[in-house]
Image (tube, rainbow, N blue to C red):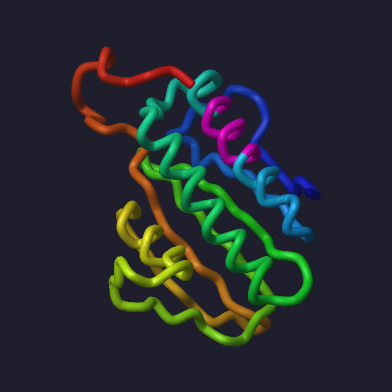
Amino acid sequence: MDAAAQNEGREPLADGPIAVSAAFEGSAEIAGARALAREFLASVQAEHGVPVSARAMGMVQLVVSELVTNARKYAPGPCLLDLEISGGVVQISVWDSGTTLPSVQATNPDRVGQHGLEIVMAVSQTFCIQREPVGKRITASVVLADDPGGDAADRQAV
């Protein structure tokens, strides 16, 4: 993993989005992508006071895992993971060099495998696939707090 950038310090979230980016090259680094997401959310919660529910923590790691796994499996070269928090939502974006856009298959409980994008779409608030000048980018977003305006006791610290 090659960590590219992360906002440092204790600047308020209102001043702009908080983001981290990293490149991943081997399939063994999928666990590293999940760890990056977990550590990023924990630091955002601790340093900026952004609520992150246990559900959101798990869903973000799941989405990261599925998208990075697909990028490593179906595209040559490294993939780039970007996580950005703005307005109580984390946007998860994975770029890879593959030119073939993934197809989301119809739900089929009898199918073994190839449920990754189906899962990502089910747990994400938004989902988008777009061509890039080189390759493609898949972006999904997950709300960080189960009840953003609700009782803080419902939120679990990470």
Magenta segment, which residues?
Answer: 35-43
Q: Quadrant of residue 78?
A: bottom right
Q: Where is residue 145? Give x, y as percent.
A: 32, 32
Residue positioned 33% across, 70% down in the render: 110
**Is residue 130 a member of the stretch shown in magenta?**
no
Q: Where is residue 56? Give x, y as percent.
A: 38, 37
Q: Where is residue 3? Give x, y as percent.
A: 76, 45
Residue 135 is left or right of residue 23, and the answer is: left
Residue positioned 61% across, 61% down in the render: 69
Residue 61 is left or right of residue 149, and the answer is: right
Q: In the image, is residue 27 above or below residue 158?
A: below
Residue positioned 49% across, 21% down in the render: 158
Q: In the image, is residue 123 above or below residue 70?
A: above
Q: Where is residue 8? Give x, y as percent.
A: 67, 30
Residue 1 is left or right of residue 15, and the answer is: right
Toward the top, the furthest residue is: 153
Q: Quadrant of residue 75?
A: bottom right
Q: In the image, is residue 25 above or below residue 49?
A: below
